[in-house]
Image: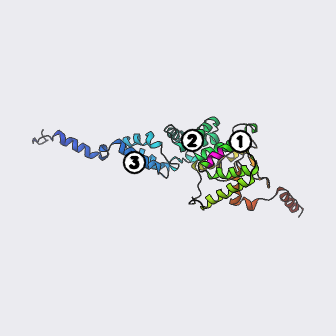
Amino acid sequence: MRTRRGVCYSAPPEDLRRVRRRKLDPFEALPDDLILSIFANLSATADSPSDLISLLLVCKRFNGLAMDPTVLSVASEKCLGIRAQRWCDPAQRFLRRCVDAGNVEACFILGMIKFYALGSRPTGAALMAQAAMRRHAAALYSLAVIQFNGSGGSKHDRDLRAGFALCFRAAGCGGLDALRELAYCLQDGYGVKRSIPSGRRLLVLAASLELGYLAPAAEEHVHVANQFLCDWFATRKDTLEGKGLRLCSHDQCGRVETRVHEFRRCSVCGLVNYCSRSCQALHWRKGHKAECVPIDQFLDDGAFALLV
């Protein structure tokens, strides 16, 4: 070969060309199995969806491997925590791919969004049932709340015995809210034969677990599905009021009525409403205890104020 000045030089051997090409892409020599293992560990411990999405922007190879079912099936709850303000069709397709990969958390999250936020009751209930069959405590408890309230149907569709059975299974899977709900059901005879001593024992057990006497106390945790519903309906209160529907008064629940007067009101003040007894107990401790005033006393005070 000749240069512009006419000087001849020998061409580099073919083996040297291949070595130079390989040096330009250091990840080319890594096997796919090793990269999939690294990506799976990353998705299982990710703190936000951006940790996984950032892999899609590196190169075409990473884009394909990061969306592999092996990686999506072990994605953590926080990795699937899509914000309500950023909900779109690509976000829904991403959760759908995680569901198809067998991710239990994705089944529960997408099921809650479908059932309460998007109004697709059968699809949402089926997705939560899919997670419940794999012993997902939050999914079992959510199905129990649906059975207790008859959500998605009429008040005649309530099945208290099925709700109690689902609560029992959820409590056995480690659901603290389900254990608390189970205790109140036994105390009140709601869906089961009344047993006040058994209910009190379960309440003591739930309090002990919550305070960390029997196990290390966990920090107060709001599931990403409940947080999504809270953020979703925070900007749609006018629409709900126009339909006569109410949110659960517990600010970390996010569930909304599927029909008018579905949730139970506080029997003392009548100003707040709850989807479950567990939410009522949590809201009572968070501040309603100081705000709850009997309705007759409230009316008397108002009448006295008008007279003055």
Report the magenta residues as a range.
Answer: 166-171
Number of the front mark, 3 or 1 = 1
Q: Secondary structure at mark 1?
A: helix
Q: Position of residue 96 (x, y in %)?
A: 52, 38
Q: Earlier in the sequence, mark 3 or mark 1?
A: 3
Residue 93 horizontal side relative to residue 142, left or right: left
Give the Cα separation between the discs numbered 1 and 2: 21 Å
- The quarter of the rendered structure image containing the N terminus is top left
- Depth check, front residue: 61 or 180: 180
Residue 41 visible? The answer is: yes
Residue 161: image tag: 1
Residue 16: quarter of image: top left
Amino acid type at mark 3: Ile
Q: Residue furthest left?
A: 7
The colour style of the image is: rainbow
Residue 49 horizontal side relative to residue 256, left or right: left
Identify the residue position indicated by label 3 in the image.
38
Identify the residue position indicated by label 2 in the image.
131
Amino acid type at mark 1: Arg
Q: Earlier in the sequence, mark 1 or mark 2?
A: 2
Q: Residues within 10 Å of mark 2 (few under 14, many from 20)?
A: many
Q: Position of residue 305 (x, y in %)?
A: 86, 62
Give the Cα separation between the discs numbered 3 and 1: 45 Å
